């Protein structure tokens, strides 16, 4: 009883032990009382937080589920671009390099200047050869004109010769006709002269007989003799006239032959002068000269191209990704001098599983997240789906006909283009991305 009574007055006070310090049991009672009073509030707070977390998780889960149902997503994707390798088309020494790695360049900008002395010398030689051949071709064409004019003049001359020869033939023919008429006339006079001669000779014989007999005087004999001599002379003249007429006929016939020869010569000259072969041959020479001009012009253009090829320019807008050229280096045709990463045509190559491709079509919108830019979503669209899987392009394609075949899900590259990417977030080939194609 004392112990109980002793314990009662201690209610509301701090008990002490024998050393004057507070007793431990009373201390625990004072501390446990507020803890027991705070536990319901904490429990209610924890339940509320848990409920909110569950609700948020449900909301996020529903959104994720709905997004996953309407999208096909892959993280096997990267940013790509058609890297352009800058090479030289000629073998020459590098004189100047105007750009460096990571520098932006524009299409047509001079990147490298090669030594052009040899090319310029060949250009001057080609230009001189073209000029010389053009002069020869012009001379050949002038010769064609001269040949045409010569042919025309010779044809006119030959026509004149033909006309003259034909006139000569006509005149000679007229002379032949005249000579023949003269022969006829001369021949017609011969019988009369012969008959007159015969009468004169007969009269001379009678007169001689009568003079010898003395029947007529001798003076009549002289007259008979003179008459016979005159008849003889007339007969000889008539014969001579026939011979002269025959000579004139022969001369006229000879003139006809000469005139015919002149006519034949004039006709032959006309045929020769009007032959198209002369002008054609001259024109062929001119054409050959102009064809040579064309060949030399091609060589001149080649020389010009080689001079221009000493200036290596950027084929596209972009950035210098890698530079292999050095000053003084002698480069060969096709040697890579630098690589340009285009600033345009940046796209995503996403390797989707073949089981995902059934609902992917060109033109579908795509959400793109780039690892380099956390919290930023880029937008794009499907451009094309590769016609084969990646393994098809490997050096040793898979042979599925083997007995120990293991089915492996293949991946098909899908090209995705960006829709107006922000300029303050540059996209570089090789960056890892996550692509989600909206298929519903």
Image (spheres, helix red, strand yellow):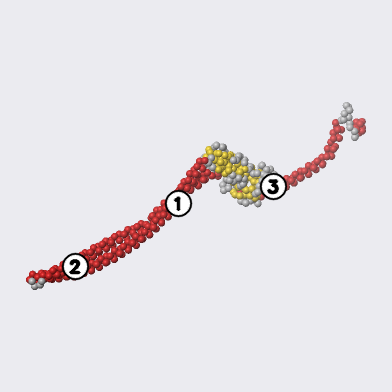
**Picture coordinates of residue 61, whole percent (x, y):** 71, 46
> Which comes sooner in the sequence, label 3 or label 1?
3
Residue found at the far left of this picture? 213
**Picture coordinates of residue 358, whole percent (x, y):** 61, 50
**Residue 256 appears in the figure:** yes
**Picture coordinates of residue 120, whole percent (x, y):** 51, 43
Of the two numbered discs 3 and 1 in the rendering, the one whose residue sits closer to the viewer? 1
Residue under pointer 1: 138
Q: Along the horizontal axis of the image, is 354 left or right of 201?
A: right
Of the two numbered discs 1 and 2 in the rendering, the one whose residue sits closer to the viewer? 2
Between the residue at mark 2 and the residue at mark 3, the CA separation in whole angstroms equals 156 Å
State if disc 1 and disc 3 touch (CB < 8 Å). no
**Picture coordinates of residue 162, whole percent (x, y):** 34, 61
Crowding at label 1, few (<14), some or many (≥20) Cα neighbours within 10 Å? some
Crowding at label 3, few (<14), some or many (≥20) Cα neighbours within 10 Å? few
Residue under pointer 3: 64
Residue found at the far top of this picture? 19
Q: Along the horizontal axis of the image, is 327 left or right of 62?
A: left
Q: What residue do we see at 18% from left, 70% from top?
A: 192
Q: Along the horizontal axis of the image, is 188 left or right of 416?
A: left
> Which comes sooner in the sequence, label 1 or label 2?
1
Q: What residue do we see at 62% from left, 48% from top?
A: 417
Q: Nearer the viewer, residue 156 or 89?
A: 156
Quick one: SS at disc 2?
Answer: helix
Q: Nearer the viewer, residue 379 or 362?
A: 379
**Residue 400 appears in the figure:** no
Crowding at label 2, few (<14), some or many (≥20) Cα neighbours within 10 Å? some
Instruction: Work out whether 241 lies above or below 291.
Output: below
> Which comes sooner in the sequence, label 2 or label 3?
3
The numbered dot on residue 234 is 2
- Residue 25 location, quadrant: top right
Between the residue at mark 1 and the residue at mark 2, the CA separation in whole angstroms equals 79 Å
């Amino acid at each position: 009883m004392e112990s109980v009574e002793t314990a009662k007055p201690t209610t509301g006070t701090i008990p002490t032990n024998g050393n004057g310090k507070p007793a431990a049991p009373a201390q625990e009672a004072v501390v446990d009382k507020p803890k027991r009073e705070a536990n319901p509030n904490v429990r209610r707070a924890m339940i509320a937080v848990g409920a909110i977390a569950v609700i948020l998780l449900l909301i996020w889960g529903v959104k994720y589920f709905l997004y996953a149902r309407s999208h096909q997503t892959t993280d096997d994707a990267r940013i790509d671009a058609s890297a352009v390798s800058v090479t030289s088309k000629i073998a020459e020494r590098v004189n100047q390099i105007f750009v460096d790695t990571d520098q932006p360049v524009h299409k047509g900008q001079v990147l490298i200047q090669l030594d052009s002395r040899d090319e310029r010398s060949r250009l001057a030689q080609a230009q001189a050869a073209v000029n010389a051949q053009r002069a020869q071709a012009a001379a050949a064409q002038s010769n064609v004109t001269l040949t045409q004019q010569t042919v025309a003049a010779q044809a006119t001359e030959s026509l004149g010769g033909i006309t003259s020869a034909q006139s000569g033939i006509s005149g000679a023919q007229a002379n032949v006709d005249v000579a023949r008429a003269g022969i006829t006339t001369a021949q017609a006079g011969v019988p009369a002269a012969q008959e007159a001669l015969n009468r004169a000779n007969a009269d001379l014989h009678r007169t001689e007989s009568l003079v010898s007999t003395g029947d007529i005087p001798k003076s009549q004999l002289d007259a008979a003799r003179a008459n016979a001599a005159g008849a003889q002379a007339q007969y000889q003249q008539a014969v001579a006239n026939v011979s002269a007429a025959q000579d004139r006929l022969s001369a006229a016939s000879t003139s006809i032959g000469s005139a015919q020869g002149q006519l034949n010569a004039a006709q032959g000259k006309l045929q020769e002068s009007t032959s198209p072969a002369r002008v054609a041959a001259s024109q062929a020479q001119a054409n050959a000269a102009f064809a040579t001009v064309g060949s030399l012009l091609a060589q001149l253009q080649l020389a010009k191209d080689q001079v221009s090829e000493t200036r290596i320019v950027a084929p596209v807008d972009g950035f210098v990704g890698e530079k292999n050229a050095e000053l003084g280096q002698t480069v060969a045709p096709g040697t890579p001098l630098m690589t340009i990463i285009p600033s345009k045509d940046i796209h995503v190559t996403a390797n989707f599983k073949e089981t995902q491709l059934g609902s992917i079509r060109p033109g579908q919108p795509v959400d793109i997240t780039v690892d380099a830019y956390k919290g930023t979503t880029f937008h794009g669209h499907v451009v094309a789906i590769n016609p084969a899987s990646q393994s098809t392009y490997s050096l040793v394609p898979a042979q599925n006909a083997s007995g120990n075949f293991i089915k492996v899900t293949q991946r098909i590259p899908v090209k995705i283009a960006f829709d107006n990417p922000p300029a303050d977030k540059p996209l570089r080939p090789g960056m890892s991305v996550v692509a989600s194609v909206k298929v519903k």
